[in-house]
Image (cartoon, grey):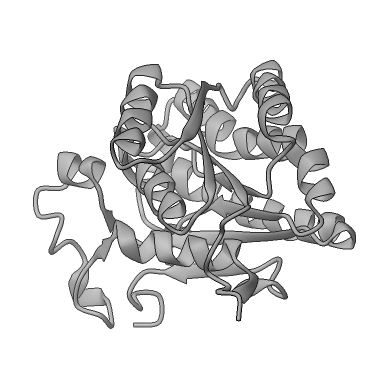
Amino acid sequence: MVDPLNLKGKTVLITGAAAGLGRAFAHHFARVGATVIIADINEGGLAETKSLLEDIGVTNFAQNVDVTDAKSCRALAQSVQDRFGGIDVLVNNAALYAGLDRRAFEEFDEDVWDKVMAVNVKGVWQMCRAFSTQLRASGAGSIINVASATVFSGSPQWMHYVASKGAVIAMTRVMAKEMGGDNVRVNALAPGFTLTDASFGHIEDARGYGVDRAALKRNADVDDITGAAIYLASDLSKFTTGQTLVVDGGKQFI
């Protein structure tokens, strides 16, 4: 019997792979046999991720990309087409998160708002548009749009980020309907607070942050989130599309 979690023969592209959750996605998809393509605007961090994958014996391909720029996304798509013949799975992970100021919605600078929307919303659209032909040609494509559980909690003083991730969920539903005829599944993955380098960098007590509001009394490690992504990429979820999988330890129903 074929292991449905074995992604050997599948080509997976991950944006925002220079650090944090994106780097973890790359590592864990490689562990289950996928061919991994990594992309990010941060060339130094991207090179580090590539090196880390090579250190564990994983052959991969890396290319710099600006997800807000259509030409950059198309150039990445052409490189992937030339080298691999296309992708089977697209993980739209690139987003502005770390370093965003928290303040009342009346106080946001317009340029900050626009930058968040450009990366977190337009970037998802640009990547899906650039790779839609390849995903349709796959015959069993999967798009995983990384959203956020903050959409459901209404995290205060962070409206630019929360609104952008709400838009990601909305786009996911539209694309699921538009691409379903070609057997392309489109789902959103909505992590709760996850322990990454960025988390430890701006939250003093990251491990204990908000756990009193969760059913499972801890915050997510990256393994918790990457496992959900692998499920959405695998045949275990082959009849699941247009959905949002919240992985937050049960905070949203407490």
Q: Is residue 111 left or right of residue 143?
A: left
Left or right placement of residue 53 versus residue 137 in this view: left
Q: Is residue 243 above or below residue 101?
A: below
- How many labels sit on residues? 0
Q: Position of residue 18 (x, y in %)?
A: 37, 31
In this view, the residue in front, 4 or 252, is 4
Residue 223 relative to residue 90: left or right: left
- Residue 74 in percent (x, y) is at 72, 23
Q: Quadrant of the N terminus?
A: bottom right
Residue pushed farthest right? Answer: 181
The residue under the point 52% across, 69% down is 5
Of residues 10 and 211, the one drawn nearer to the viewer in this rendering: 10
Image quarter where the C terminus lies is: bottom left
Can the viewer see residue 246 in this picture?
Answer: yes
Whether 69 is drawn above or below 235: the answer is: above
Judged left or right of residue 26, residue 210 is left
Residue 96 image-quadrant placement: top left
Q: Which residue is depicted at the point 58% across and 51% down? A: 145
Residue 215 percent location from the top left of the image: 28, 83
On the image, which quarter does residue 19 sit in? top left
Residue 152 visible in the snapshot? no
Observer-nearest of 107 and 170:
170
At which x and y percent is residue 82? 72, 25
**Residue beneath the point at 35% across and 38% down:** 53
| Residue at x 68%, y 43% (from the top left corner) | 87
Q: Is residue 190 above or below residue 91?
A: below
